[in-house]
Image (cartoon, rainbow, N blue to C red):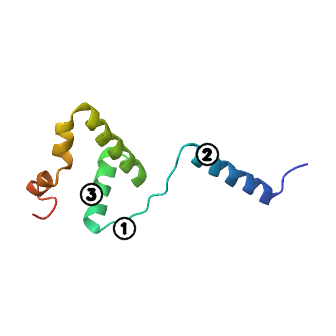
């Protein structure tokens, strides 16, 4: 017997939910101000990314890799002092 539209949709939602649970997906929501949004758009364009989430995922994994590869470079990239010197954040 063929599934109804509602049954197919429920089966699809159940499969998607199971997949998200299996991969440990976690919802992430944040308020983003203009400067951050503009920076994200520039990175997205420069990297050829289609989605904001792709950019954030790559940046997170890149920073994580720097921790294992070169901790001093990681510290330089994310330190508030370095960001202040570059004028990215207020002193």
In this rendering, the label closer to the viewer, 3 or 1: 1
Of the two numbered discs 3 and 1 on the same chain, state the one appearing first in sequence. Answer: 1
Of residue 40 and residue 16, the one placed in the foreground of this image is 16
For marks 3 and 1, give the CA distance.
Answer: 14 Å
Q: Which residue is mark 1?
A: 31
Residue in the image at 83% along x and 57% along y: 4
Q: Is residue 58 above or below residue 6?
A: above
Residue drawn at (25%, 31%) of the image: 69
The residue under label 2 is 19
Q: Which residue is mark 3?
A: 39
Contact between marks 2 and 1 (CB within 8 A): the answer is: no
Q: For the residues carrying marks 2 and 3, which lies nearer the camera in this image?
A: 2
Looking at the rendered structure, the secondary structure element under dot 3 is: helix
Where is residue 63 shown, x and y percent of the image?
29, 42
> Picture coordinates of residue 89 (x, y %)?
16, 61
In front of the other: 88 or 41: 88
Q: Nearer the viewer, residue 10 or 67?
A: 67
Judge the density around disc 3: few (<14), some (14-19), many (≥20) Cα neighbours within 10 Å.
Answer: few
């Amino acid at each position: 017997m063929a599934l109804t539209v509602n049954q197919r949709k429920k089966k699809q939602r159940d499969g998607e939910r199971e997949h998200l649970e299996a991969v440990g997906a976690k919802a992430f929501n944040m308020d983003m101000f203009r400067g951050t949004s503009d920076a994200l758009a520039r990175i997205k364009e420069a990297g050829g990314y289609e989605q904001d989430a792709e950019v954030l995922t790559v940046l997170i994994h890149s920073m994580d890799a720097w921790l294992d590869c070169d901790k001093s470079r990681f510290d330089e990239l994310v330190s508030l002092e370095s960001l202040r010197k570059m004028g990215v954040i207020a002193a």
